[in-house]
Image (cartoon, helix red, strand yellow):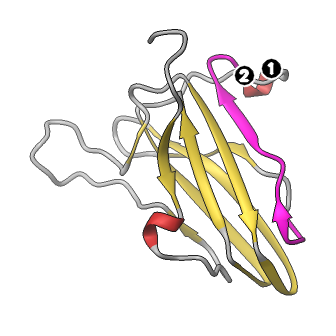
Amino acid sequence: MPENEPAKLIWSLANTGLTAISGAGNSGGWSSAGTTPNALSNLDLRFVDDLALYVFVGAITSTPTLKVQIDGYDDLGNLFPAIAATANITAAGAAAPVYVGRHGAGSAAQFVVLPMWGRVSWTCTGGSVTGTEIALWGR
């Protein structure tokens, strides 16, 4: 991959039309159907070395705790949860981004060989968040 390769949007909550979260959800599960020889998920990480997860919350109702994570799948569709995860988000605004991949971001736990397939998942308890955007960028 060229050194100055531009970042690309891998997945975005805004593209799904969902902006309010009050429970658990994800970007989509594993699919063994299709015309390709390999099963897959809708997060194709095959050509990505590094990921950045950004979360923004417009407003909160009650006292929510939102947690967003990057999960991985092996080639048989077994889920490996929380390759990387945000801290608990309890207020409106931008959460601290999460970085993971070949180049890491300072901590040895952030140096990860990414699987070919993944998903973004979230849980929200104790209330709800609105005006929410979750974006997964890769390079």
Magenta-span inclusion, residue 93: yes
Image coordinates for residue 17, horizontal then vertical, percent = 47, 75
- Horizontally, residue 60 falls left or right of residue 48, namely right
At numbered mark 1, what does the secondary structure look like: helix, strand or loop? helix
Which residue position holds label 1? Answer: 108
Q: Residues within 10 Å of mark 2 (few under 14, many from 20)?
A: some
The amino acid at mark 2 is Gly
- Horizontally, residue 61 falls left or right of residue 17, namely right
Which residue position holds label 2? Answer: 104
Q: Is residue 129 above or below residue 56?
A: below
Label number found at residue 59: none
- 69 or 131, which is in the foreground? 131
Residue lying at the far left in this picture: please name it.
35
- 116 or 62, which is in the foreground? 62
Q: Is residue 38 above or below residue 5?
A: below
Name the residue rendered at 39%, 28% in the picture.
46
Q: In which quadrant of the rendered image does the N terminus lie? A: top left
Q: Residues within 10 Å of mark 1 (few under 14, many from 20)?
A: few
User: How far, Cα to Cα, is label 2 from label 1?
Assistant: 7 Å
Disc 2 vs disc 1: Cβ atoms closer than 8 Å?
yes
Image coordinates for residue 123, horizontal then vertical, percent = 69, 69
Name the residue rendered at 69%, 50% in the picture.
54
Name the residue rendered at 41%, 32% in the picture.
116
The segment highlighted magenta reads 89-104
- 28 or 14, which is in the foreground? 14
Q: Nearer the viewer, mark 2 or mark 1?
A: 2
Image coordinates for residue 85, horizontal then vertical, percent = 73, 48
